């Protein structure tokens, strides 16, 4: 019986297992079959397949087949129990993380040199105050022993004679004094007595004190030439040009207060200058100018007054007159980081042979457009221009005698432009302007047409055809508009190239043309330092055409021209040098003044000595 019971129990368990498998596939038909029939059925499926089937069943597994009281005692003596299998635990492993890098088998340990230490036996300084800076030593000069004096002399074609000498006391920061002498003369071959020469000597001195600086100079200048310009169509007689010379003795002295680097500075200066001028005939001019200024600075604000007294006496064989001016220029100045403003007036009183009073503007403005590169500037001013015999002879050495004296007036000169540097080393300045000038002075030819029986100047008969220029004025208000441009390229201390161009347009009141005034002018030059022994210089002058007026209001045109010059200086030793200078290299035949042709190609050279 016992064995029979065991068989019955085993059959019952297998039956329940098979029933549970079917219950997972059909969850709503869960039944318990009698134990007697279980013995007649084949063996149950393997556990693996039962688990896979059970894993596919989606059923609520919170309820179990029996209860807590489902025991043989309370279920009618049956040992059957409902068991629900949900799934078989199948562990899942992630893919292994592979290290795709081979190990470095080389020994890369850096070499460490053995270190040695040396201790410093120094006291720690804990003073955090700012220390006084030591003065920087002056750099050593190129020449360890500079030479203070220099002289050179030479000669060449066209009977050229040249000489100059400079002497001074040497390097002294408190006192400078010296003297100089220069001479240059040539004799042309195109016309009779086409000669000119210039001689000048002078002394100068400058002393710098703790508060003031005093400087002064005395000069003597002599220029001479001949009136060799003739209209050959008016005369067939042998030409014997008259000689002209101009002598000028000048002197000046100036006292200035030294610069003060303070927010409130009071500065002043006084200057006394003058000259005595004479020509070969009866032309004389004496001039004394006393000028000065006072200026008070308060940070970026300036206030001051400038004044001058210009006293002149002029005479020739037909007149003797006083022609003097007094000027006063009160001003205010403001200066900031990007701007500079000068606001003032120029008060001028003319006295002597003429008495007039004017108040002109005196204003300037500068504004920084591009920092460190471009500045905009504008200026409006006016003044009286005193007609000077000395200045006229410097402009035109072939001027005649008994010049008509009349002062011109710059009513209003307005200028607007830009200045600065295009790039390091390239400086520029460009401006347009418009000037209103009353009584503009003009040179015109004065060709002697016939012998009148009386000399034009006592003791100086003017031959027929000789041209001595006269001075006339455009009576009324003339308008001059134009453009000025300057370039200065300094690539280094060894190369410098510079140039200036001037363009003018004249609208005159009474005269037909601006006689002998060019409308275009270009000047340029260069200085090249090849090495410590060779220096080269060059210059270019290009002047546009001009017009002149002769007797009968006949207009004569003087053609434009270009003049190129250049020279070389060779330093053979520390003290001895050799130079060569060539003028009018293009051998251009041109006239600056009517009937006065300039010199053709000429060359001269010589020696220089430093001591």
Image (cartoon, rainbow, N blue to C red):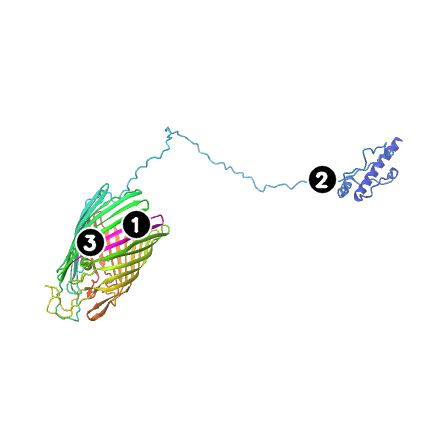
Tag 1 near tag 3, CB within 8 Å: no
Query: Quadrant of the rendered structure where residue 516 is?
Result: bottom left
Q: Is residue 449 left or right of residue 334?
A: left
Q: Calculate the distance from the C-alpha at mark 2 to the C-alpha at mark 1.
A: 102 Å
Q: Calculate the distance from the C-alpha at mark 1 to the C-alpha at mark 3.
A: 24 Å
How many marks overall? 3
According to the image, label 2 marks what residue? 90
Q: Element at badge 1?
A: strand
User: Is tag 2's residue or tag 3's residue first in the polypeptide sequence?
Assistant: 2
Q: Residues within 10 Å of mark 3 (few under 14, many from 20)?
A: some
Q: Is residue 68 magenta?
A: no
Question: Which numbered circle lies on residue 288?
Answer: none
According to the image, label 1 marks what residue? 332
Q: Is residue 65 left or right of residue 489?
A: right
According to the image, label 3 marks what residue? 310
Q: x, y (%) of residue 609?
A: 19, 49
Name which residue lies at 68% across and 40% down: 92
Q: Is residue 172 left or right of residue 338?
A: left
Q: Element at badge 2?
A: loop
């Amino acid at each position: 019986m016992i064995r029979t019971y065991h068989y019955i129990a085993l059959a019952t368990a297998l039956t329940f297992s098979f029933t549970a498998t079917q219950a997972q596939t059909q969850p709503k038909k869960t039944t318990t079959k009698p134990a007697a029939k279980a013995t007649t059925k084949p063996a149950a499926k393997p556990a693996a397949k039962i688990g896979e089937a059970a894993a596919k069943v989606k059923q609520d597994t919170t309820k179990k087949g029996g209860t807590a009281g489902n025991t043989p005692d309370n279920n009618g003596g049956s040992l059957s129990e409902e068991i629900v299998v949900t799934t078989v635990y199948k562990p899942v492993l992630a893919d292994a993380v592979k290290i795709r890098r081979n190990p470095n088998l080389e020994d890369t340990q850096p070499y460490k040199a053995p270190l040695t230490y040396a201790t410093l036996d120094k006291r720690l300084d804990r003073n955090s105050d700012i220390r006084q800076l030591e003065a920087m030593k002056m750099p050593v000069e190129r020449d360890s022993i500079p030479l203070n004096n220099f002289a050179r002399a030479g000669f060449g074609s066209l009977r050229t004679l040249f000489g100059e000498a400079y002497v001074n006391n040497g390097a002294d920061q408190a006192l400078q004094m010296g003297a100089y002498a220069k001479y240059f003369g040539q004799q042309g071959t195109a016309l009779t007595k086409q000669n000119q020469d210039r001689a000048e000597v002078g002394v100068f001195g400058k002393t710098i004190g703790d508060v003031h600086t005093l400087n002064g100079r005395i000069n003597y200048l002599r220029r001479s030439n001949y009136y060799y310009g003739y209209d050959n169509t008016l005369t067939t007689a042998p030409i014997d040009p008259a000689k002209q010379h101009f002598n000028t003795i000048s002197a000046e002295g100036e006292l200035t207060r030294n610069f003060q680097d303070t927010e409130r500075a009071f500065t002043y200066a006084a200057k006394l200058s003058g000259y005595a001028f004479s020509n070969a005939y009866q032309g004389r001019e004496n001039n004394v100018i006393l000028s000065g200024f006072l200026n008070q600075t308060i940070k970026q604000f300036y206030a001051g007054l400038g004044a001058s007294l210009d006293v002149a006496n002029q005479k020739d064989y037909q007149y003797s007159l006083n022609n003097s001016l007094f000027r006063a220029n009160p001003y205010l100045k403001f200066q900031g980081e990007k701007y500079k403003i000068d606001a003032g007036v120029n008060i001028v009183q003319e006295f002597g042979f003429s008495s007039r009073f004017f108040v002109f503007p005196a204003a300037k403005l500068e504004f920084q457009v591009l920092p460190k590169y471009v500045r905009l500037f504008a200026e409006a001013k006016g003044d009286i221009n005193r007609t000077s015999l000395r200045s006229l002879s410097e402009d035109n050495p072939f001027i005649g005698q008994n010049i008509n004296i009349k002062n011109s007036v710059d009513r209003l000169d307005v200028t607007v432009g830009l200045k600065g540097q295009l790039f390091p080393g390239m400086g520029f300045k460009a401006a347009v302007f418009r000037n209103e000038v009353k009584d503009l002075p003009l040179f015109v030819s004065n060709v002697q047409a016939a012998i009148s029986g009386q000399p034009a100047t006592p003791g100086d008969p003017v031959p027929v055809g000789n041209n001595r220029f006269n001075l006339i004025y455009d009576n009324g208000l003339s308008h001059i508009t134009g453009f000025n441009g300057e370039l200065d390229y300094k690539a280094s201390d060894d190369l410098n190239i510079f140039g200036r161009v001037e363009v003018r347009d004249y609208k005159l009141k009474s005269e037909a043309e601006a006689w002998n005034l060019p409308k275009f002018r270009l000047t340029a030059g260069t200085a090249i330092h090849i090495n410590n022994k060779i220096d080269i210089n060059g210059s270019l002058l290009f002047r546009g055409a001009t017009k002149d007026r002769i007797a009968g209001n006949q207009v004569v045109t003087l053609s434009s021209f270009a003049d190129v010059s250049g020279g070389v200086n060779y330093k053979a030793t520390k003290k001895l040098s050799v130079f060569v200078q060539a003028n009018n290299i293009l051998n251009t035949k041109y006239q600056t003044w009517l009937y006065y042709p300039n010199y053709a190609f000429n060359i001269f050279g010589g020696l220089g000595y430093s001591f």
